[in-house]
Amino acid sequence: MARMHTRRKGQAASNRPSTPEVPEWFDKDAKWVEDKVVELAKAGNTPSMIGTILRDQYGVPLVKVITGKRITKIVEENDLQRQVPEDLRNLIAKAQRIRRHLEENRKDFVAKRGLQLIESKVHRLSKYYRRVRVLPADWKYSPEQAAVLLR
């Protein structure tokens, strides 16, 4: 897939397991995986970080194949989700970093343009999340309150 604001192609990513079935070498059950997901979520990890930790440290190929539920669903069932979705939160954090940079480097016009592009992505994504009712209908992004949202 191509990038949104440039004429380049996207980055390559790692490949998922080829078959959507539990491998015969995997010896843990679904209850163990769910407990580990809850434990990692309580430690403050994001869903993508939980998946990476499970893959790298515990050899879990795919949580959805083993448990029948996605990591975000398991986190929601245990009331451990954050108020702002992870992808939106990462974009807001990136915008905050660029704003901090622009306070010191006011003449950095490339960074100003980058901030505009990032904030347009924030607005577009928040509009989607309001439409699918992940965020409240009156939720609004403002740079002044972004630090509060990132907690």
Image (spheres, rainbow, N blue to C red):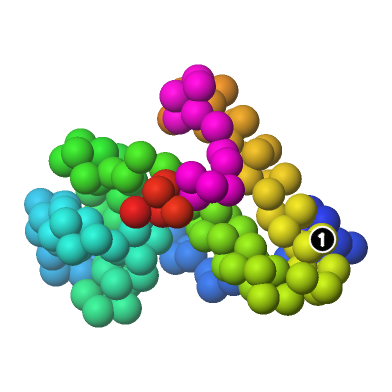
> Quick check: 70 left or right of 1?
left
For label 1, the crowd category at 10 Å Cα-Cα, with few meaning under 14, some 14 to 19 and many 20 or more, is: few
Span colored in magenta = 135-146
The question of residue 49 being in magenta is answered with no
Q: Position of residue 144 (x, y in %)?
A: 54, 47
The question of residue 138 being in magenta is answered with yes
Residue assigned mark 1: 113
Q: Position of residue 73 (x, y in %)?
A: 30, 40
Q: Is most of the magenta stretch helix, strand or loop?
A: loop
Task: Please name the residue shown 22% across and 45% down the image.
Answer: 80
- 139 vs 116: above or below: above
Q: Position of residue 89 (x, y in %)?
A: 48, 52
Identify residue type, mark 1: Arg
Q: Position of residue 111 (x, y in %)?
A: 76, 68
Which quarter of the image is occupied by the N terminus? bottom right
Residue 32 seen by the camera: yes
Task: Please name the residue shown 32% across and 45% down the image.
Answer: 82
Q: Secondary structure at mark 1?
A: helix
Task: Please name the residue shown 43% across and 59% down the image.
Answer: 19
Residue 65 seen by the camera: no
> Quick check: 107 left or right of 148?
right
Q: Nearer the viewer, residue 103 or 22?
A: 103
